[in-house]
Image (spheres, helix red, strand yellow):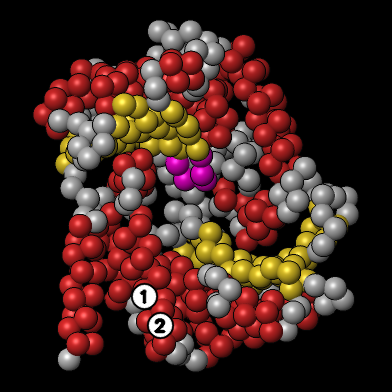
């Protein structure tokens, strides 16, 4: 009886904890098309102001790759009312922090300030949208910054070419075939007119979502948003019509070289659906099952028990149009890449051919419940999630109900999805070897 009472108490406490995670928000559109999401949390005197633009590495023309990432840097150069090079100084001198990042699908800018600097955060982002100074000096400066980043993160980083290798071999016609950072020859060839045209097309209010989250008053913030963003002109609607990939039906084997490594690697890669599709959620569960933690199937077998690999993992690389799924390992000693490939395929085949155990299934569900509880633990994180769910998933309410998708996934569905996407004839085998690097 005591055990039952304790279990009942634990379940009630867990339900209460999950309920407490619900994120309240209000969203609406300005007349210029800017989507606004406000989240009030007066628990701490901080506020996050962020803008996500629906522009990423895939938004380019042939011969002009890498523009979205380039703009991530360029739009910190300065504005009509912010002197060149002063952006970060303004933020730090007012007790704030800021950053930006770019994926193949979107670009995200944000500031975190003490809440008495809400106006400053809104002003900065409105300046970035309305008054950026785009001139040859800024273009030249940021080209060098991007080149240095490419050298650091890709050219001179061990296994830094792996992601470009994946894109090149999983895609033939979709822009995901090219790296998010782009090719330096394309940036070098870009004219000032090219850059200005890109800004005019994508960095407009109707291609963006503004999120203000934290210690705010909703009514006051609405007025400030209108004051700072309401008069920014609407841009032309962005129309995307990227080519579709044909299914992969025969296994492809490729080799890439990396001068920065001494230990080779083997990868089994698959093209998968975009992250908003239900199957992508199932694949996320499969990757967790196979490789999340030292008790996971791949790690326990290949690293712990058989001592054939230094590292092994299954990674669901989520993207909007198509995903990339990679099973990857580094060998120990004399273990060959062929042996590692066989061992990894054996574990994937078990998921395709059998239901995972009820025990493992419950363990998976517990992990995703825990991730959900922790996902909205900071105002900064909430701001990013709200923007992402609205812009890329088309459903802001997923911030509160995405866990319901994971809860509804069955063992049978896990088997079905593994069979659908993770078969040998749908894979690209990547032999990643030491040697003169493969150029991209």
Tell me which segment is drawn in magenta.
102-106
**SS class, disc 1:** helix
Q: Give 436 or 99, whichever is nearer the viewer.
A: 99
Quadrant containing the N terminus is: bottom left
**Residues tagged 2 and 1 counted as in contact (Cβ below 8 A):** yes
Residue density around tag 1, few if under 14, some if 14–19, many if 20 or more, within 10 Å: some
Work out whether 70 lies above or below 1: above
Q: Which residue is mark 2?
A: 361
Is residue 192 shown above or below 205? Answer: above
Membership of 217 in magenta stretch: no
Front residue (pair 140, 117): 117
For the point 20% across and 57% down, the residue is 20
- In the rendered image, the residue lying farthest to the front is 2
Say which residue label 1 marks.
Answer: 365
Which residue lies at the image location 40% right of the left edge and 32% below the top edge?
110
Where's residue 230, x and y in %?
22, 21
Q: Quadrant of residue 156?
A: top right
Q: Quadrant of residue 304?
A: bottom right
Where is residue 174 drawn, in percent x and y? Answer: 56, 52
Image quadrant assignment for residue 360? bottom left
Work out whether residue 266 can be spotted.
Answer: no
Residue located at (21% from left, 81% from top) = 6
Residue 137, compared with residue 174, is above or below; it is above
Q: Could you say where residue 182 lies in the image, as x and y percent from the top left?
A: 64, 39
Position of the C terminus, as image quadrant, is top right
Q: Is residue 378 above or below residue 150?
A: below
Q: Is residue 104 magenta?
A: yes
Q: Main secondary structure of the magenta part?
A: loop
């Amino acid at each position: 009886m005591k055990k039952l009472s304790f279990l009942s108490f634990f379940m009630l406490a867990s339900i209460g904890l999950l309920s407490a995670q619900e994120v309240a928000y209000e969203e609406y559109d300005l007349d210029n098309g800017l989507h606004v999401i406000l989240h009030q949390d007066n628990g701490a005197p901080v506020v996050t102001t962020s803008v996500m633009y629906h522009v990423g590495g895939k938004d380019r023309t042939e011969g002009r790759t890498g523009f979205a990432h380039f703009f991530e840097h360029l739009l910190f150069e300065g504005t009509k009312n912010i002197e060149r090079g002063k952006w970060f100084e303004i933020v730090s001198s007012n007790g704030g922090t800021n950053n930006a990042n770019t994926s193949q699908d979107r670009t995200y800018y944000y500031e975190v300030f003490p809440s008495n600097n809400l106006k400053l955060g809104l002003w900065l982002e409105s300046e970035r949208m309305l008054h950026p100074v785009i001139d040859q000096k800024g273009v030249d400066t940021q080209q060098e910054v991007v080149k240095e980043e490419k050298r650091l993160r890709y050219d001179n980083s061990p296994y830094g070419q792996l992601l470009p290798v994946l894109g090149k071999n999983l895609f033939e016609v979709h822009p995901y075939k090219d790296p998010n950072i782009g090719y330096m020859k394309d940036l070098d060839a870009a004219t000032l007119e090219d850059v200005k045209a890109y800004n005019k097309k994508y960095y407009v209010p109707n291609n963006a979502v503004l999120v203000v989250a934290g210690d705010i008053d909703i009514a006051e913030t609405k007025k400030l948003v209108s004051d700072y963003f309401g008069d920014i002109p609407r841009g032309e609607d962005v129309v995307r019509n990227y080519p579709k990939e044909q299914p992969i039906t025969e296994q492809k084997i490729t080799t890439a070289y990396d001068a920065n490594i001494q230990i080779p690697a083997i990868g089994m890669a698959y093209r998968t659906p975009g992250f908003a599709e239900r199957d992508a959620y199932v694949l996320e569960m499969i990757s967790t099952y196979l490789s999340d933690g030292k008790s996971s199937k791949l790690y326990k077998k290949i690293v712990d028990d058989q001592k054939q690999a230094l590292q092994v993992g299954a990674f669901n690389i989520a993207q909007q149009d198509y995903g990339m799924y990679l099973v990857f390992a580094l060998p120990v000693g004399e273990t060959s890449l062929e042996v590692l490939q066989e061992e990894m395929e054996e574990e994937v085949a078990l998921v395709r051919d059998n239901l995972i155990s009820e025990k493992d299934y419950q363990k998976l569900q517990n992990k995703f419940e825990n991730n959900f509880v922790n996902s909205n633990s900071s105002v900064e994180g909430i701001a990013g999630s709200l923007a992402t769910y609205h812009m890329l998933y088309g459903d802001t309410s997923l911030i509160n109900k995405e866990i319901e998708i994971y809860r509804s996934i069955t063992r049978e569905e896990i088997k079905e999805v593994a069979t659908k996407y993770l078969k040998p004839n749908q894979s690209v085998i990547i032999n990643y070897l030491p040697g003169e690097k493969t150029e991209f």
